[in-house]
Image: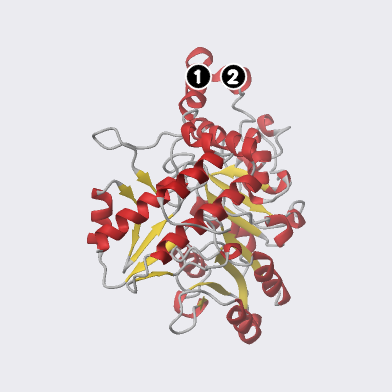
Amino acid sequence: MLYKTGLDFAKKQDQEDVLAHYRNKFHIPKDNQGNNWLYFTGNSLGLQPKSTQKYIQQELDDWAKLGVEGHFEAKNPWLPYHEFLTESMAKIVGAKPIEVVVMNTLTTNLHLLMVSFYQPSKTKYKIVIESDAFPSDKYAVQTQLEFHGFTAEDGIIEWKPRPGEELLNIEDLETILNQQGDEIALLLIGGVNYYTGQYLNLKRIAQLGHAKNCMVGIDLAHGAGNIKPELHDSGVDFAAWCTYKYLNSGPGSLAGLFVHEKHAYNKNLKRFAGWWSHNKTTRFNMRQPLDVMPGAEGWQLSNPPILSMAAIKASLDMFNEVGMDALRKKSIKLTGYFEFLINQLNNHKIKIITPKNPNERGCQLSIQVQNADKSLHHKLTEANIITDWREPDVIRCAPTPFYNNFEDVYWMVEKLKAIIN
C-alpha cells in the first residue's frame, strides 16, 4: 500500500483497523504518569490479555472448592485440559490436531524430539543449524552430539550468510546438502531467525533435507503466532515453539510440539516416555506395559501444569476468535508502515537487516545502528519505548498486530529520530 508520513495518516489507519479494539483487551504497561509505554517486544514476551486473570482464577477457585476432584469435576476438567488447547494451536501453526500438543518448555521438547528423530550412525551423524541460531538450540545440538559420542566441532555444520550479508540463502543450504548430505542426519533450523527476523522457506528446507535422507526439525519460537508456518503442508518432521512471545501466555509458560502425521502411528520410534505418553484409556490401570498414544500426545511425559495452561487458553481463545489470516494481514501492513518510516529518516547509520519481502519476515524488524552500543537501548527505555537489544548493534522491534497500532509506530520512529540526532 501507499504509506504517508505524518501523525494524521497513522490515526486514520487506526480508525480503519478492524482489529483496533483488541488493543484494549491487553494490559499495556504504563509510566509513572499513567501514559502507555510504546511496547515493541512481543518477540520476547507478549503482553498479558486482560482475560488471563479470570481464566487462572477459575482454576484456583475449582482447586479450592474441589481439591483432587477438580481433575474430573472442574468447569474445565484438569485431566484432559491439554486437549482444550489442541485445535486452536493446530490452526495457528497450520497442523492437524493429531500433530500438536502443548507440553514442557521449548528446549525440553527439542531434546525429546531429537531422542526420536536424531538417530546417528557412524557415518551419518552431522547436524545442520544456522550459524546464528539461538544459543539454546546450539547447546541442545552440541549436547545431543556429545551424548552420542561425537563432538560439536566435527558434528555441527553451520549454514552461514554469504560474506558481507546478514541473511541466509537457501541455495547455500542446497550446496551443503549436495556436498555433505551423506554425513548429515538432521537439520534443526529456526523457522524465523531470532536475530534478523528472516522467515525461511520451511517446505523447501524439508524437501532439500529429505532428498538426502535427513530428518528435518524446526524451532518456531519466533514464528508461532507471528507468521503462518503451515507445518503439515511443509512436510517437516517435527517442530517446537514457546508460547510466551507472540502467543501471550506469560513468562516461562509451556511450549508447543509438532510431529508430522506421517510419524503418528510409528510406535517403533525411540523416545523417552512417561505415564502421559501411555494410552489414556488405560493410563490409570497402572501396572500396564507402555502403550504409546498415536500422534504428538505420545511425546508427553507428565500431567501438565494447569495454571500455565489456563493462561495459554486465555490467549488461544482470542487467536481462535480473530484467526491468523486477519492477524497476518494487519501485521504485513503495520510492519510495512514501520519500515517506511525508518527508511524516511534517510539516515546512513540506520539499516534494516530483516528481509524487505513481507513473505520472508513476520512483524519483527531488526534495526542495525552503526557505531551504536547499548546506551541507545537505555535511552529508548528512558523514553518509555520498550525494545530488545542484541549485541553488537541491533534493536529488535516487533509491532505486534494484536495490541500495537499505527500511532505506536509513528511515535516510536519519531523518538528514535530525536535520540539518534
Q: Residue at x 59, y 75 (%)?
A: 125
When the figure is inspected, residue 370 is found, relative to residue 100, above or below; the finding is below
Residue 165 location in percent, x, y? 46, 79
- The reply to whether callout 2 and callout 1 are in contact (CB within 8 Å) is yes
Residue 74, numbered label: 2
Residue 269 seen by the camera? yes
Secondary element at image label 1: helix
How crowded is the residue under tag 2: few (<14 C-alpha within 10 Å), some, or many (20+)?
some
Quarter of the image containing the N terminus? bottom right
Residue 66 location in percent, x, y? 54, 14
Callout 2 amino acid: Ala
Residue 121 location in percent, x, y? 63, 75
In front here: 345 or 35?
Answer: 345
Residue 183 location in percent, x, y? 62, 80
Quarter of the image containing the C terminus? bottom left
What coloring was used for the rendering?
Answer: secondary structure
Q: Which residue is mark 1?
A: 63
